Amino acid sequence: MITVEFARPLYEGSDPIHDFDHVLRVLALARRIGQAEGADPDVVETAVLLHDIHRADEDQGHAAGDAEVGDHALLAADAARQILARQDPPPSDEFIEAVAHCIAAHRFRNSIDPQTIEAKTVFDADKLDAIGAIGIARAYAYGGMMGQKLWGEVPEGYAGNGPDHTAYHEFVYKLSKIQDRLTTATGRAIAQERHAIMVEYFDRLRAEIEGRA
């Protein structure tokens, strides 16, 4: 088993959106979902602890304009195989591949769908950390890093990360749709409340922006 103490240094240099605090939040959610859904806790926890170890590399590559930068989920899955194979004693090949699949399938933006209950648990836990109150905080933390404004209207047909992108754009374009993409009954139940919190927040924010509240 990979421990929290082992994994923590692997995230040094990460941004505040994908740092080790994110991993610990996902771990807490994954334990909750996995217990309810009957997932193997060892597979789930190992995958969560290693799932974003190449996120900083991908983000830095994009920032540098490297068009050839790899998918952090696939890079982390390969790295997890190597890390686990070096453990003493090493886990079984089946365990290693179960963990690697969870990591490879945790991302929205690739073509790998989570096939096992463990992978679905990790996927849902990771996505849940992007919504609700913490999701709003993360969106504004990212906006601060990128110099975004606090508010802007979303034009009809908006479909990307344009120059006027704000946390509200992120909510309309992506975060509001996450609850429909989750894969477990437990994850969907948690998402309903978190989604409602975001709707309420941005409704209130609009009212304050417009001087109605």
Image: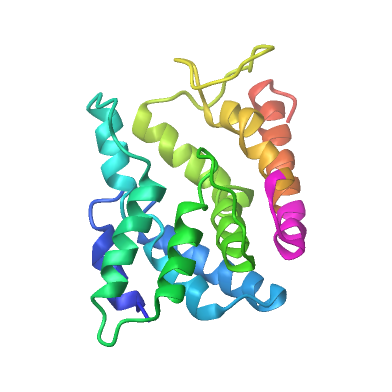
Q: Which residues are magenta?
A: 181-193
10 above or below 105?
below
The answer to which of 37 and 101 lies nearer the viewer is 101
Chief secondary structure of the magenta portion: helix
Q: Quadrant of residue 86?
A: bottom left
The answer to which of 170 and 75 lies nearer the viewer is 75
Residue 60 percent coordinates (x, y): 25, 37
The answer to which of 110 and 193 lies nearer the viewer is 110
Residue 63 falls left or right of residue 139:
left
Q: Residue at x 23, y 66 (%)?
A: 9
Residue 196 percent coordinates (x, y): 76, 47
Q: Quadrant of residue 91?
A: bottom left
Q: Is residue 18 magenta?
A: no
The answer to which of 184 and 194 lies nearer the viewer is 184
| Quadrant where the C terminus is found in the figure | top right
191 above or below 167?
below
Q: Residue at x 59, y 55 (%)?
A: 114
Q: Quadrant of residue 206?
A: top right
Q: Is residue 182 magenta?
A: yes
Q: Farthest residue in the top direction?
A: 156
Residue 117 falls left or right of residue 8:
right
Residue 181 percent coordinates (x, y): 69, 45
Residue 110 percent coordinates (x, y): 50, 39
| Quadrant where the N terminus is found in the figure | bottom left
